[in-house]
Amino acid sequence: MRLFCLFIISLTICSSGIAQDSLVLKTGQRIPYTRLSILDDRVEIKHEETKEFHEYPCAEVYGYSEGMKERTYFIKPNPEEDGRGNYLILKRALIGNLSLFEGTGNNQSLYMEKEGRIEKVFGVTESKSQRMERLEILKSFVSDDEESMAYISSSGFKYKWREILTVATYYNSRNYDEKVPDGNDVMGWVYLYRTQFQKTKDRIVIEMYGEDHDLYLEDYIILPMPIDYASKLSLRDSEIRSTHIMSGELEEQYFEVIYDSKSNTFRFDKKTGTELQYEFYKIRDKVGKKITHD
């Protein structure tokens, strides 16, 4: 594992770690840019290094990340061309057998995706009758899950944004289908680390796709995960066991693994900005020096 980490470090974070804006293609290629425009069915960028302009069909693009702003966006085909063009710029809100995406800008809508099918399931400004039509679409997505159907068919169910998120979350917890990554998957990098200020001092073993990864205090590991679907992580030490479902993203993700005494489980605390400077990068540099001297 340590050699694996060193190899990845040399490819991804040997530089100062300054985030940059990147266009992500479905081939897995990441292209740094300084300017980006989306024009109907194509994306135009100004390459950060060459300063040249390039165009890519939206059908060939996953999305793009704004590194300094720590934002990522997916480009998806518009299921209903309502004046917004052939493609939508969306933020992913949930990943699993059911994935949810939020509209951006003036598009205050919620979209659901399952097995390549994407549909609009909620619009903030829509009428009651329109929402009832969306409810039927939602039912078609969860019709294979009795508990979800019973919940949304009950008299007390209110068709709201938060309720749809709840339905999708519990649907995913009951319906996880493991898919083993292959060479065609586009991967994202997930960094997991632990500080010295932990209530449990034992090593944590993190299992993913049948392989164990050891995580010690003031240490970190890097896990490549597919962007397009969820992966399951199982965490254990001498006693505690937890599971988490997550995926790779268009840019690197950083999480501190923390023991939660109330639930007696491990949780992932996502880190951005200055927290990374004081926690992860400090641990990364310390580990790097130790490996070099070894």
Image (cartoon, rainbow, N blue to C red):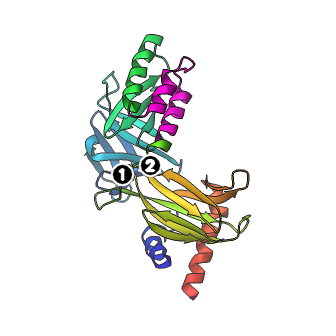
Marks 2 and 1: CB-CB under 8 Å? yes
The residue beneath circle 2 is: 65
Q: Amino acid at mark 1?
A: Val
**Magenta includes 170?**
yes
Residue 201: x %, y % from top left: 70, 70
What separation in Å lies between label 2 and label 1 (alpha carbons)?
8 Å
Residue 157 in the image: state x and y as whole percent.
Answer: 55, 21
Q: Give neighbour class at mark 2: few <14, some 14-19, many 20+ (Cα, 10 Å).
A: many
Spot occupied by residue 233 in the image (x, y as percentages of width and height):
50, 58
Judged left or right of residue 53, residue 3 is: right
> In which quadrant is the C terminus drawn?
bottom right
**Magenta stretch encompasses residue 145:** yes
Looking at the image, residue 24 lies above or below residue 191: above
Residue most extreme to the front: 146
Query: Is most of the magenta stretch helix, strand or loop?
Result: helix
Q: Which mark is residue 24?
A: 1
Which stretch appears magenta? 144-172
